[in-house]
Image (cartoon, helix red, strand yellow):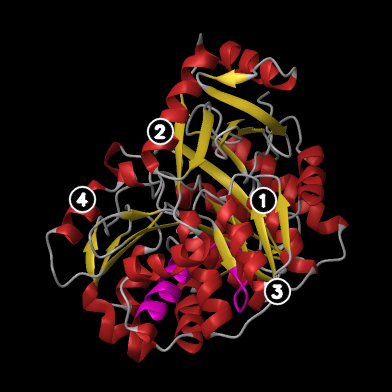
Amino acid sequence: MDTIKFGTDGWRAIIADTFTVNNVNRVAWATAKWLQSEPLEKHCVLGYDCRFGGQLFAEETACVLASEGIKVSLSPSFVSTPMISLAAFKMKAGAGIILTASHNPPSYNGFKIKAHYGGPASPAEVSKIEDLIPDSAVLVPHSLQAYLDQGMVEYVDFESMYIEHCQYQFDMDLLQKNAPQLAYDAMYGAGQAAVRKMLPKTQFLHADYNPSFMGRAPEPIAKNLPELSDLIANTPELTCGLATDGDADRIGFFDEHGTFVDSHHLILLLIEYLTDYKGYTGKVVKSFSVSDKVQALADLKGLETITTKIGFKYICEHMVEDDVLIGAEESGGIAIKGHIPERDGVWMGLVLMEYCAKTGKTVSQLIQDVYAKVGSFAVERYDLHINNDLKLSIIENCKSNHYDSFGDYKITQMEDTDGFKFRLNTGAWVMIRPSGTEPVLRVYSEAATSEEAFRILDATQAAILN
């Protein structure tokens, strides 16, 4: 029996190894039993992204849910995670499920659970589902067609629901007018069809169905997006670039020069736009790995901040219960007031396009405006693929205060909200944390310049690996 555990964002595993039809069956059954036991609608919205086997796994999930008396609204084609979250909220369903491994390599698939409020199910509810997972797959008495005939499963067009929601919320005439200035890299992911329908004059990259992702993990970070960067740099009429990950809940963004704009900078831009141009207020909820500059800007604007563990489900809890302006994490997952409490890469891209269009400024000009308030900075990250024994040893060293410096950088303070953030004598910081979804040790650093951040990362890597 395979042990199934949910990480920071759902259960993910390698297809045909642990992510099998039988194991999906077990998780679906546990989800059905959880829905039955809770005071929630016995109705689930269900979809899948562009990964291999998505439709197969989704149909197995639909049959298991239906066999347990849960009405299922099933997507007829691939959809993004935000589409499922929005549908769960709009249709007042008890839950949403999407088969996706988000930004993981193409060999993975996954199972995310969304709550009735349109965001990730809380850690407490996910733990309940984990506890209900049976030791073996359950028998499904009927075929999908039989459940369709019974009315227990129905097909619903979640993509059109999402597009209509965007068209209602945004000045689409303005965005369509500026669409020829946008390049969009779908990374072969689930945002491709919706963006093509909303902004057909955009220049598209990797916007067709290809479950192999051409061998590249669909994570919208600079090293995975060289074609998008080159296209913008060599096409004068392009003023910005958008990329979204496999299930289109994370954003990658580029300025008019083809320079990658990381999430830390995007968070600052969004705070500026939401407060200065939209007149919104609310708390700023940020994950532990986010730049200190977010705190600095919030302080300037008199906005209360909350720092959470890494994982959007922790941010979502605050967005559901409190008045939150923006909830954001370092890895490209951002949610804002006026939308569901869910990361949405396409939505954030539309907001940033709107910001540029309404101000008449370029992305780099808007960033300089922010720098004038909080100062320039850079946050860089290394992903160390090391064996598990070494990873555990490094984590134990962090816990036991083994390190007092990394090269010439002296440690002045350590914070351990989630991982280990070491404040340095230069005013910079470096953070060490194991990934919750991949066999990787992540090392982050913030400093005044990118060059300095990389020097800190190199010194830290040398210290922890020796």
Q: Determine contact: label 2, label 4, CB under 8 Å.
A: no
Task: Look at the image and give the residue range highlighted in magenta.
Answer: 336-356
Pair 1/4: label in front: 4
Choose the circle earlier in sequence order: 3 or 4: 4
Pair 2/1: label in front: 2
Report how far apart the C-alphas of labels 2 and 4 lie in the structure: 24 Å
Specify whether residue 344 is painted magenta. Answer: yes
Choose the circle earlier in sequence order: 3 or 1: 1
In front of the other: 55 or 160: 160
Badge 3 crowding class, 10 Å Cα cut-off, few under 14, some 14 to 19, many 20 or more, is: some
Looking at the image, residue 464 sits to the left or right of residue 188; the answer is: right
Residue pictured at 19% horizontal, 61% vertical = 232
For mark 4, what is the residue? 227
For mark 2, what is the residue? 454
* Label 1 residue SS: helix
Choose the circle earlier in sequence order: 2 or 4: 4
Specify whether residue 143 is painted magenta. Answer: no
Pair 3/2: label in front: 2
Amino acid on which disc 2 is placed? Phe
